[in-house]
């Protein structure tokens, strides 16, 4: 599997090794716009460590969506995706950090999201990976993950502290919101909730409310729910890793 990504190693210009894997002087980026001004502003591949206990064939995409929410102060930090990607690589996963930016303001929320999905799909195609990825995202970035899997394949998704519903996401116009998702969870889904959000998700989030009580099937198909203290800590990352092990990834 790691041989598929040899071409990225030369481009990444490694400058140091640490206990958290390979770090580079700059991320591998692609600024290709493929609709509604959306573009990829960060693209960094970490190959599995050569000393990892095993090599996992299903790649992970740690995704950030920038510009979904109007309030710039609400944008999530990239530090947790960097930390998680480095540790997942140490554990034998190919971990890819991807940031997709909405681009210039304009169009409806649906049109902007369509452009971001198109750009994400473009970046996934360029990876030329043999298996659909597992997408991991947090907060409002989970909206891009769920929009993507509505039309594109994924081996699984991890939604960390997602919005209770799409109507709860801040917008400059109450009439310009994404419609609620209606995809069926016929693949593994993990919803990770901080303690203070768990009650709202259980009562109002359709995945948690409607599907968690049904349990999961073979290979983890269905919706699993984990309640944690700190949703972006390494302890939570280990919770995600254990879930992937149970699913057989």
Image: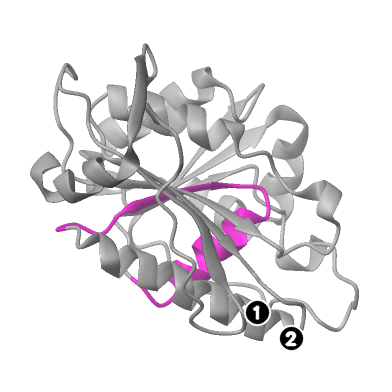
73 sits left or right of 161 in the view: right
Q: Secondary structure at mark 2?
A: loop
Rendered residue at 52%/37% (across/down):
81
- In the depicted view, which residue is nearer to us: 230 or 98? 98
User: What is the number of callouts on the image?
Assistant: 2
Residue at x 76% of width, y 84% of height: 106
Question: Which residue does the image show at 49% across and 27% down from the upper left?
Answer: 83
Residue nearest the viewer, comparing 163 with 56: 56
* Residue contact at pointers 2 and 1, CB within 8 angstroms: yes
For label 1, the SS is helix
Give me the residue at 74% from left, 49% from top: 75
Q: Which mark is residue 64?
A: none
* Figure quadrant of the N terminus: top left
In which image quadrant can residue 70 be found?
A: bottom right
Tell me, yes or no, whether the highlighted magenta stretch contains residue 143.
Answer: yes
The local crowd at label 2, few if under 14, some if 14 to 19, many if 20 or more residues have their Cα within 10 Å, is some
Q: Is residue 21 left or right of residue 32?
A: left
Q: What span is colored magenta in the figure?
A: 130-152
**Residue under numbered circle 2:** 108
68, above or below 15, in the image: below
Which quadrant holds the C terminus? top left
User: Callout 1 environment at 10 Å: few (<14), some (14 to 19), or many (20+)?
Assistant: many
Q: Is residue 68 magenta?
A: no
Rendered view: 53 above or below 164: above
Where is residue 50 shown, x and y percent of the image?
A: 15, 22
Q: Position of residue 94 (x, y in %)?
A: 26, 40
Instruction: Report the residue marked by disc 1.
Output: 112
């Amino acid at each position: 599997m790691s041989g598929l990504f040899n071409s990225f190693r030369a481009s990444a210009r490694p400058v140091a090794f640490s206990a958290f894997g390979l770090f580079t002087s700059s991320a591998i980026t692609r600024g290709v716009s493929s609709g509604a001004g959306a573009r990829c502003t960060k693209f960094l591949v970490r190959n599995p460590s050569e000393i990892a206990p095993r090599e996992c064939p299903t790649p992970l995409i740690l995704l950030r969506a920038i510009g979904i929410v109007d309030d710039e102060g609400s944008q999530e930090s990239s530090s947790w995706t960097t930390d998680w990607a480095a540790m997942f690589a140490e554990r034998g996963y190919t971990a890819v950090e991807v940031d997709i930016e909405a681009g210039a303001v304009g169009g409806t929320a649906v049109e902007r999201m369509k452009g971001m999905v198109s750009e994400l799909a473009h970046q996934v195609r360029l990876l030329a990976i043999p298996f659909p990825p597992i997408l991991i995202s947090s907060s409002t970035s989970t909206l891009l993950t769920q929009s993507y899997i509505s039309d594109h394949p994924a081996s699984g998704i991890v939604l960390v502290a997602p919005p209770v519903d799409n109507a709860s996401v801040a917008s400059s116009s109450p009439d310009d919101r994404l419609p609620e998702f209606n995809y069926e969870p016929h693949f593994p889904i993990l919803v990770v909730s901080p303690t203070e959000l768990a009650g709202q998700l259980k009562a109002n989030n359709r995945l948690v409310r409607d599907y968690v009580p049904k349990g999961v099937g073979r290979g983890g198909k269905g919706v699993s729910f984990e309640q944690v203290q700190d949703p972006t800590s390494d302890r939570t990352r280990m919770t995600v890793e254990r879930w992937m092990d149970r699913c057989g990834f």
